[in-house]
Amino acid sequence: MRKEFCNYEQALALKELGFDEPFKPFNTFYYRNGNLCEANEDAVIYFNSEVILAPLKQQAFRWFREKYNLVFNFISYSIVKPGEYHWSITWNDEAKATGAVKTYEEAEEACLNKLILMIKNQKQ
């Protein structure tokens, strides 16, 4: 199940962007050293200054869609170039980013990283 969570760098960036939706019934989080851990809600509240919530990638994608109206058509296997997975991000009916990689997982990572970067740049 660990592969379903955002990595430490993504979790930290999402926290900086205001993401704070815990994964129930257990909160999964990263210690500041990057180690992934699970704890009950009280533990996360108690150690809140020392931890960063580790959202599921699915939660992060939903958050970007709901909060920023970002739409992504991502992870389609290429018919034109077999062996490629494509992702794209659309904002207000305008294509903002696209990419092609070799695996589904790489497409998820690339799309999520680009979403984070887009919002970081928008806030600056």
Image (cartoon, rainbow, N blue to C red):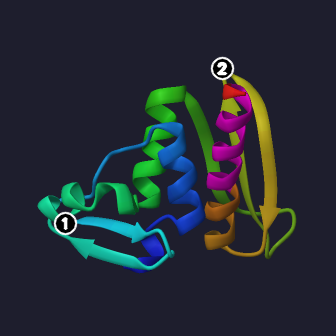
Which residue is the site of mark 1?
A: 26
Q: Is residue 120 magenta?
A: yes
Which structural element holds mark 2?
loop
34 and 66: which is toward the camera: 34
**Over which residues does the magenta segment extend?**
111-122
Residue 44 location, x and y as percent?
23, 61
Numbered disc in front, either 2 or 1: 1
Position of residue 122 in the picture relative to residue 84 (left or right): left
Q: Is residue 75 magenta?
A: no
Quadrant in which residue 69 is drawn: top right
Residue 58 location, x and y as percent?
43, 55
User: Which residue does the image show at 78% across and 34% down from the upper left?
Assistant: 96
Which amino acid is tagged 1?
A: Phe
In the rendered image, the quadrant that contains the N terminus is bottom left
Prevailing secondary structure of the magenta residues:
helix
Q: Earlier in the sequence, mark 2 or mark 1?
A: 1
The answer to whether residue 111 is seen in the rendering is yes
The answer to whether residue 25 is seen in the rendering is no
Crowd rating for badge 1 (residues with CA inside 10 Å; few <14, some 14–19, many 20+): some
Which residue is the site of mark 2?
A: 92
Crowd rating for badge 2 (residues with CA inside 10 Å; few <14, some 14–19, many 20+): few
